[in-house]
Structure formats: C-alpha cells, structure tokens
Amino acid sequence: MINTGDELICTDGNNCYVEGYICTIGNFINERFFEVMTGNKKECWYARKDNEGIYVAFDAFKRVVWFDKLEY
C-alpha cells in the first residue's frame, strides 16, 4: 500500500525521470491515480498504480516510467 508522503524510486526511466531518481507521492486523485511531486514540490506528474505496478505514462516521449516504493 502506498500513501501520501511515501517515497518512490524510479526503476526504469526516461528523459524526465532517470533510473534511481527519488520522488514523493503527493495527493491521491482516486484509489489508482495520484501525484508524483517533482523538482520544487509544486509541480507534479500524474501516476497510476495497478496490477502492473506504479508508473507515469508520457505521451510526448512514448515511454512509460516505472517506480517502486522505497522501504526504509
């Protein structure tokens, strides 16, 4: 289960999110869609969590970026 404030690590990136990049989960839109905060914490991309995993789809890049939840 993921929650607002949890950190994600990029496991398969692109030009926006490189592998190893760590970001924070922002607000949830619904049970499957949520914000992934970037840069100055005021900007975000919308991510999805489903049976395939956690990812952001970039139409402009024709690429999906995959994340895993960081466990401390």
Image (tube, helix red, strand yellow):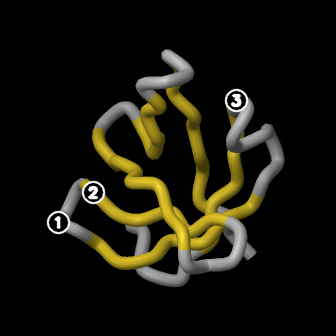
Residue to which mark 2 is pinned: 33
* Picture quadrant where residue 35 is located: bottom left
Residue to which mark 3 is pinned: 14
What amino acid type is highlighted by mark number 3? Asn
Q: CA distance from mark 3 to mark 1?
A: 26 Å
Count of numbered marks: 3
Q: Secondary structure at mark 3?
A: loop
Residue at x 22% of width, y 68% of height: 29
Q: Nearer the viewer, residue 27 or 72?
A: 27
Q: Are marks 3 and 1 in contact (CB under 8 Å)?
A: no
Q: Nearer the viewer, residue 21 or 42?
A: 42
* Picture quadrant where residue 4 is located: bottom left
Q: Is residue 16 left or right of residue 2?
A: right
Structural crowding at the residue carrying mark 2, measured as other residues with C-alpha within 10 Å and reported as few (<14), some (14–19) or many (≥20): some
Residue 60 position within the rendered picture, expressed as x and y whole percent measured from the top left: 49, 24
Residue to which mark 1 is pinned: 30
Q: Residue furthest top?
A: 62
Q: Are marks 1 and 2 in contact (CB under 8 Å)?
A: yes
What amino acid type is highlighted by mark number 1? Asn
Vertical placement of residue 18 versus 30, above or below: above
Q: Quadrant of the C terminus?
A: bottom right
